[in-house]
Image (cartoon, helix red, strand yellow):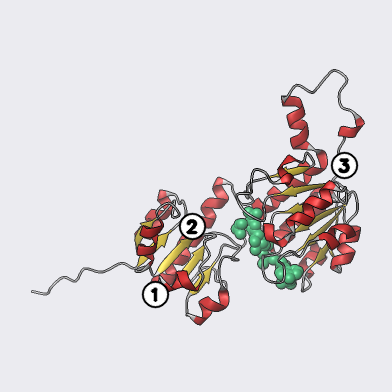
Amino acid sequence: MRKRVKSVKPKVVVYKRMSEQVLDFIRESCDVQYFPDYKKEFPAFLEALKEAEGVLGSSLKFDADLLDQAPKLKIICNTSVGYDNLDIPLLKERGIMATNTPDVLNDTVADTIVALMLSAARRITELDQFVKTGGWSEYGLSQQQFGVDVHHKTLGIIGMGGIGSTLAKRAYFGFDMTILYYNRSRNEEAETTYNATYCTMDELLEQSDFVCIMTPLTQQTEKMIGKREFEKMKKTAVFINAARGKVVDEAALIEALQSNEILAAGLDVFENEPTDPGNPLLQMPNVVTLPHIGSATAETRMRMAQLGAENVVAGVTDGKLVTSIY
Ligand SMILES: NC(=O)C1=CN([C@@H]2O[C@H](COP(=O)(O)OP(=O)(O)OC[C@H]3O[C@@H](n4cnc5c(N)ncnc54)[C@H](OP(=O)(O)O)[C@@H]3O)[C@@H](O)[C@H]2O)C=CC1
Ligand SMILES: O=CC(=O)O
């Protein structure tokens, strides 16, 4: 009689909260070790990494020390489009694949940016508080409480990639805005479809009513917007950051707002997250803040998780990756 050989499923560590539906999808072909709160159970998480061939999650920095704890690792799948938590040259050197979740979140993040632009320009959160705290009287608003228009203004997008272009579409077709952009390379599609004008960073800063940065965080983009850049902006400029907190010099942003160098800001991201409750930005009525929720709708987070899950399964079973960073 032939001896039955029990097949051993590849081990996958999931270190971010994930729906049972997505976990079950991975479990069909992998042995899943699930750490929804990996920081609270870090020793067990490290133990699981020793045998893991695949990892799925986001934001955790995989440096050389952590990779040393995961000798069998074949693939790291981020459930985010940003991958500044990954040291790409190091992963390549070690033969570890890496994936992210491009495109599936473009519309949702662009919607979030529009919400920040409208909220900051029309003082939505400030006036919401005004109504809720009983400030609204029969005399209505004072002129000092009026906002500024978004429509027909100039929007400067630094980083005209997937999300930047999706924002340009909304701004151009929905709000009749003039689009300027700055990238290292030209985006011809944005130029022909949204009439976007390619310009230098300084031209963009000087001419835009709304400045939105949407680059990845890299060595080149870290603190790309600082004191000099805020000084170049119009005094009436509204600054939007939904990329990464560290692409901006946060101290310079605080100073620019305190000294009326710019009018207002809309921020989904901060230098440190969660940001310190004592951060002066949180006390400013002309700053709209969000807790890094650019892609956080149920539908989009599900699509991102599913894409990450498909990638991790493909990576550990020698299948074809759906997306790949390199
Ligand atoms: N707040 C949130 O929840 C979210 C934040 N993000 C952040 O947004 C970033 C962008 O996402 P996405 O649009 O999908 O990425 P893309 O790669 O599609 O676009 C990035 C753009 O940035 C440009 N860029 C890169 N480096 C530089 C540079 N040094 N100077 C000027 N432009 C530069 C690129 O053009 P070129 O290479 O020609 O310079 C490209 O057009 C992510 O990396 C992530 O950090 C993403 C999703 C959600
Ligand atoms: O910050 C979110 C991302 O997808 O990147």
Q: Do the residues under discs 2 and 3 have CB atoms within 8 angstroms?
A: no
Residue at horizontal 35 percent and vertical 63 percent from the top: 47
Residue 300 in the image: above or below residue 189:
above
Name the quarter where the N terminus is drawn: bottom left
Q: Position of residue 187 (x, y in %)?
A: 77, 69
Q: Which is nearer the eye, 302 or 275?
A: 275
Residue under the image location 90 percent in, 65 percent down: 203
Q: CA distance from mark 2 to mark 1?
A: 26 Å
What kind of element bears circle 3?
loop
Badge 3 residue CB within 8 Å of ligand 1: no
Amino acid type, residue under disc 2 in the picture: Gln
Q: How many numbered circles are shown?
A: 3
Location of mark 1 (residue)? 71
CB of mark 1 near ligand 2 (< 8 Å): no
10 Å neighbourhood of mark 1: few (<14), some, or many (≥20)? some
Residue 102 position by quadrant: bottom right
Question: Which is more foreground, mark 2 or mark 3?
Answer: 3
Task: Provide the residue designation for mark 2.
Answer: 306
Rendered-image quarter of ligand 1: bottom right
User: Which residue sits at x=76%, y=44%?
Assistant: 287
The residue positioned farthest toward the top in the image shown: 138
Q: Is residue 27 left or right of residue 215?
A: left
In this view, 285 is above or below 74: above
Tell me which amino acid carries mark 3.
Answer: Val
Quick check: 104 left or right of 31?
right
Task: Look at mark 3 in the image and give the residue it sits on.
Answer: 148
Comparing 250 with 319, the one in front is: 250
